[in-house]
Amino acid sequence: MTIEPDPTAPVLDILRLEEDPGTPDQFTGRSLPQPSGRVFGGQVLAQALLAAGRTITDGRLPHSLHGYFLRAGDAREPITFAVERLRDGRSFSARRTHALQGGEAILSMITSFQEQQPGLDYADPMPDGIPGPDEVPSALDVLGGIDHPVAKFWTQEAAFDVRHVDGSIYLGPPAEATGRQAVWFRSRGPLPDDQLLHRALLAYACDQVMLEPILRRAGRSWVTRGLSIASLDHAMWWHRDVRVDDWLLYVQSTPSAQGGRGLGAARVFTQDGVLVASVAQEGMVRFPD
């Protein structure tokens, strides 16, 4: 089995957006090939965030984003990122970014940036009793021996080492139908010391696991016959600086599902227990019955 020497390199490459010299605050991005042929949602989130960040000139960093996935994107076609400068205040800046293909929006997102400031500082602790990443099998251990394009993509070509604490649901339903999940992840290669990039890569990485607690609570898996699943929106809050080339723990839950939709929530901790981000995503999740 051949593993990419640095699987993060292709991701970093497609996150380098090209500025449109004829249109202010407009950028063009490319996509990684996907087994489905569609643009990966985490990728377009990260690119839209970086496009918005290119219009911030005073070093302010994103603290929150709220976006809607409007259409499936074609991974073979370029994506245009058009940024609108909504406000630049004394402490905060707001940007609206539309990701466009064929003149139609595939993502619409608002991001808020803030300059570094002192203030009230507290956080919930990381749950006790969760085994460390060295004690948990990786996706490569689970899927590495399977000769299938999707298995190859999420192991040999994946930029992140993903480790499910209570076992993955790649190949079958969970042992217990619970809406809780804990996942360790870390990039497979070193990354530049660029906080905006690390925050964008956190958005990139989380999209692949955010809806899994819904499947777990339903006692289903990614290979459930007839499963139809898609991200509808994404909300994210960065509380503190983060490095995705260090181990991070997703502590996940799903508070509700109804009407063919389910809500996934996550808190993201460093390995030493510091809360760095919170995430929520609603998805369409439909089964044949």
Image: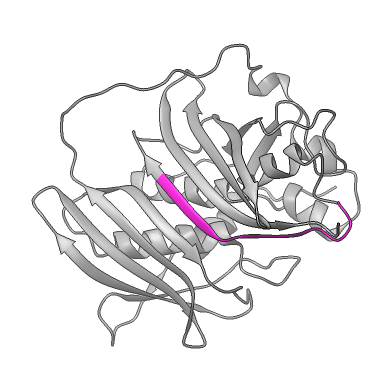
Q: In which quarter of the image is residue 38?
A: bottom right
Q: In which quarter of the image is residue 35?
A: bottom right
Residue drawn 42% across and 23% down?
A: 274
Residue at the extreme left of the image, as rendered? 90
Q: Which region of the structure is painted magenta?
A: 224-236
Residue drawn 17% across and 63% down?
A: 87
Image coordinates for residue 212, horizontal then vertical, percent: 69, 43
Image coordinates for residue 167, horizontal then vertical, percent: 78, 30
Residue 225 colored in magenta in the image: yes
Residue at the extreme front of the image, as rendered? 259
Residue drawn 14% across and 60% down?
A: 88
Q: Is residue 94 left or right of residue 270?
A: left
Image coordinates for residue 223, horizontal then vertical, percent: 85, 51
Image quarter (top left, top right, bottom left or bottom right) of the C terminus:
bottom right
The one of 276 and 147 positioned closer to us in this rendering = 276
Residue drawn 48% across and 27% down?
A: 269
Q: In this view, does 222 lie to the left or right of 259?
A: right
Q: In this view, does 116 lie to the left or right of 106?
A: left
